[in-house]
Amino acid sequence: MLRALIWDVDGTVAETEAQGHRLAFNSAFEAWGLPWRWSVAQYGEWLHVSGGRERLLAYMDSVADAPRSATEREALARRLHRLKNELYADLVARGGIPARPGVHRLMHECRQAGVALAVATTTSRVNVEALFRSLFGADWRAGFAAVVCAEDAPVKKPDPQAYLLALQHLGLRADEALALEDSPNGLQAALAAGVRTVITRSAYFGDADFSGAALACDDLDTPQSITLDTLRRALGA
């Protein structure tokens, strides 16, 4: 029996990357007087690194004007990431990032049917809180049985830590849950935890290889509406 849907956040619940996190990173770079700027295409190239702080550290390894020592780079990455999160929270608070098609509908269907909702993400808790408050209201947390963020599961996807912890909080076996993801790293993380996965292709991963997914769609409304019954039939649940 399908008892829970476990949602990734960035790219899955909302298209947060290009017009959200990327813009906030660039504003943080500018605020610190750094010449770095990520175009839409360049940012997409760095999304293979899960986690914003980790992405910054990987980027610093590739540029000549980053601090030389690992200690200095780590300190700068933490400061930039903290500021970037503040800027991102301000952006989403202004309603600049809507939910992807079908997200509200499917979540409502699950709640009506008694299927629990959970989150397993490698983004920071402040980012999740800012986005979900904007999308689902101030009391959004009451609608989710478990919320696992980067602070809870510091080993980033494709490692399964976030999913294993979400299952632990839910008190469920892997075969009682279904994951919704948009990226290859997310798919690998869910499958490594034994959780069957539905892919909703996001802007940055539209052409990625999603072998192993139980179902893949452009979004939850395209090419047809993905309903709870659709998921149950597709997964034999």
Image (cartoon, grey):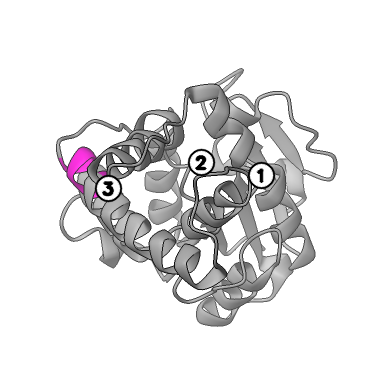
**Taken as a whole, is the magenta stretch helix, strand or loop?**
helix
As displayed, is residue 37 above or below residue 80? above
| Label 1 SS | loop
Q: Nearer the viewer, mark 3 or mark 1?
A: 3
In three-dimensional space, the C-alpha distance between marks 2 and 3, rounded to whole angstroms, equals 30 Å
Count of all numbered marks drawn on residues in the image: 3
Which amino acid type is shown beneath numbered disc 2?
A: Thr
Residue 90: within the magenta?
yes
In the image shown, does 30 or 157 lie closer to the viewer? 30
As displayed, is residue 70 above or below residue 219? below
Which amino acid type is shown beneath numbered disc 3?
A: Trp
Which amino acid type is shown beneath numbered disc 1?
A: His
Which labelled disc corresponds to residue 48?
A: 1
Position in image of residue 70 (x %, y %): 56, 68
In three-dimensional space, the C-alpha distance between marks 3 and 1, rounded to whole angstroms, equals 25 Å
User: Going 42% across and 31% down the picture, which residue do you hit?
Assistant: 37
Which labelled disc corresponds to residue 186?
A: none
What's the magenta region?
A: 88-93
For marks 2 and 1 on the same chain, the one whose residue lies earlier in the sequence = 2
Q: Which residue is mark 3?
A: 32
In the image shown, does 221 or 65 lie closer to the viewer? 65
Position in image of residue 80 (x %, y %): 34, 55
Direction from residue 151 to residue 225 in the image, left or right: right
